[in-house]
Image: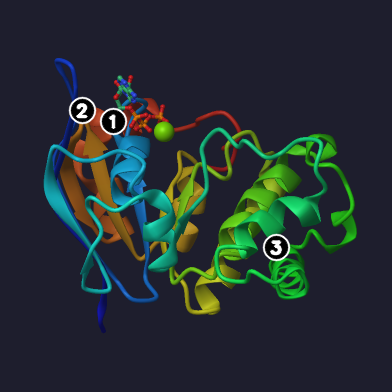
Amino acid sequence: MAEALVIKGLSKRFGGLRAVQDVSFTVQENETVALIGPNGAGKTTSFHLITGFHRPDSGSVLAFGHEVVGLKPHDVCALGMARTFQVAKPFGAMTVLANVMTGAFLRDRHIAAARSKAREAIEFVGLGAREQTPAKDLTTIDQRRLEMARALATQPRILLLDEVMAGLNPAEIDQAVALVKKLSASGLTIVIVEHVMRAIMAVARHIVVLDHGQKIAEGAPKEIVENPEVIRAYLGSYVHPPGDAHA
Ligand SMILES: Nc1ncnc2c1ncn2[C@@H]1O[C@H](COP(=O)(O)OP(=O)(O)OP(=O)(O)O)[C@@H](O)[C@H]1O
Ligand SMILES: [Mg+2]
């Protein structure tokens, strides 16, 4: 198996706060890796560092062998890495189709081609019936589908998902899990940040645990849920997080 993403020694300080400290992990091609840990552990910051939204103080991020540290977000995206945002910021007045087309324009300058790529992504995430709906009128789960469709329309090989299941009810979480599995089955390499443990257990082959910016454990899901350090730092206080009734 080839390495899709190799992260080495990633660090970022905000003033005196060490948000991410010397974090390293590797994601194999077509693997789904989960990044978990308590609030403020540095998960979203890691995504910002990996995708060029923040520049790390030190460390390296190789995407399919290319160093992406120092590149702008759109250049990272052009190399095949796309992400969703924890706080979704769609263009509210624009339709689902128009929102997703903004992603498709990264590779297709022609409107017809971008529209067709956008439609493919919209169908894939199950938003076909909402194509003409203004983004601001979508339900929570459909907003998450839109986030994923926008990322997909850039035709990534690596997809980073930041809490796409937050605020969903148990039935919607099942739908979101099915969608993540479908994305993986389509060949994508996925890094997923999520607090819903039963969803993580259903999709991830490997889990990386952050606490106070540091990696405290990584391994197979079964090992991670039994790891005393992980239970102390995170799972012990997170047995039944909101929206995770079946954890
Ligand atoms: N731009 C910033 N400036 C200053 N501090 C920041 C900035 N971004 C994040 N932080 C701080 O860095 C730490 C890590 O934040 P981050 O958002 O990465 O956590 P997280 O693991 O994603 O948490 P959550 O589960 O709540 O989303 C937090 O203490 C946060 O307050
Ligand atoms: Mg976060």
SS for callout 3 = loop
Q: Which amino acid does label 2 sit on?
A: His
Nearest the eye: 168 or 30: 30
* Residue occupying image coordinates x 20% and y 53%: 218
Where does label 2 land, which residue? 212
Residue at the outermost top position: 16
Where does label 3 land, which residue? 125
Residue 84's tag is none
Earlier along the polypeptide chain: callout 2 or callout 1?
Answer: 1
Indicate the colouring scheme.
Answer: rainbow
Is residue 54 in view from this perspective?
Answer: yes
Where does label 1 land, which residue? 41
x and y, in percent, of residue 27 in the image: 28, 66
Cβ(mark 1) to ligand 1 < 8 Å? Answer: yes
Q: Do the residues labelled 2 and 1 touch (CB within 8 Å)?
A: yes
Mark 3–mark 1 distance (CA, rounded to whole Å): 29 Å
x and y, in percent, of residue 91 in the image: 71, 39
* Residue occupying image coordinates x 76% and y 74%: 116
- In the image, which is nearer the foreground, mark 3 or mark 2? 3
Mark 2–mark 1 distance (CA, rounded to whole Å): 5 Å
* Residue occupying image coordinates x 75% and y 68%: 111
Q: Which class describes the residues within 10 Å of circle 3: few (<14), some (14-19), or many (20+)?
A: many
> Count of labels shown?
3
Nearest the eye: 225 or 60: 60
Q: What residue type is labelled 3?
A: Val
Earlier along the polypeptide chain: callout 3 or callout 2?
Answer: 3
User: Looking at the image, is 72 positioned above or below residue 90?
Assistant: below
Is residue 36 in view from this perspective?
Answer: no
Quadrant (top left/top right/bottom left/bottom right) for the N terminus: bottom left
